[in-house]
Amino acid sequence: MTLVHRVLLAVTVLSIAVAAGVATPPASAVPPPAVGSAGAPGTPGDRYAAQPPGKVSCRPGGGSRISLRCVIGTSVRGRAIVAKRQGPADAPQVLLVSGQMHGDEWPGPIVVRKLRRLAVPAGMQVWTVKTMNPDGRAQHRRHNARGVDLNRNFAARWRARPYAGPRAWSEPESRAMRRLLRWVQPDAVVSFHGFSESVDTTGGGRRARLARSFARLSGIGPATPVPCGGPCRGNLTEWYTKVSTVRGAAFTVEMPRSSRVARRCPTAGGTALPVVDCAARATLALLR
């Protein structure tokens, strides 16, 4: 039942009670307002469903920066895959950051940790997933526990080949990210990888424009198509860009191995900061 229908029902019940000269019904008889994803009343500005989809469990963030914490699924070996939101549910601009798909690529999770400590600009909500491959991260290996490359398992021109999985969406980790992206529908998705230092403009259009903006804001580059050793198939960024219902776009950032080394950071006025800090600041500035 929608919020409008609930309000109309409450008004009708109250009107009948008054007309009949009986006492006002107790509060328990009046349907509660729709609950938003942050535990607050839902508003027309919420861009995603008031309640999380099945298999997603959310609770208040409990921190000064984090407003919501959601378990979006579990890995092959049962480790939780966690998404956290900064900013309010009704913020009109939505950004999502995937810190890690390949368990041996370490800079992205550090960027996410840095980003979660920053204040989110007004009118924006930022969702972050430190790792969508906790099994691979625990073993410091590229693939998940079944030997599947998660960035070959999405339904974007998927084709059977080594490390792609037996079919698209065969892995619980890729399904968890699909669940989150379909629910949140971000305007932009930044997917961090390593280690060739480049920002992927494959696909052109808004995807490439966002990639070039990130390269300029972060000082990471060049902004150029990033090959996959052949046609890129089954990757997250192409899939989300094609299926987004809000014309959202996703792109990949290949971080350098020197990501902890300081260099001039455009978003800090040219101050020397570690590359991971520059990437976190550039991510927040991307939709401004």
Image: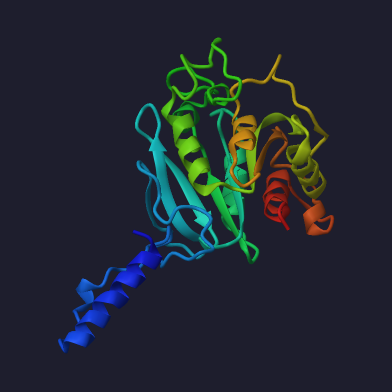
Q: Position of residue 118 (x, y in %)?
A: 62, 59
Camera-nearest residue between 224 and 207: 207
Q: Identify the image quadrant of the N terminus.
A: bottom left
79 relative to 157, above or below: below
Q: Residue at x 55, y 31 (%)?
A: 101
Camera-nearest residue between 242 and 184: 242
Q: Answer with the quarter of the image where residue 126 lies.
A: bottom right
Number of marks drawn: 0
159 relative to 187, above or below: above
Q: Answer with the quarter of the image where residue 35 lies.
A: bottom left
Camera-nearest residue between 101 and 17: 17
Q: Position of residue 117 (x, y in %)?
A: 58, 58
Q: Residue at x 60, y 41 (%)?
A: 244
Q: Position of residue 254 (x, y in %)?
A: 70, 33
Q: Is residue 87 left or right of residue 265?
A: left
The residue lying furthest to the left in this view is: 22
Q: Position of residue 262 (x, y in %)?
A: 76, 46
68 relative to 239, above or below: below
**Residue 176 seen in the current view:** yes
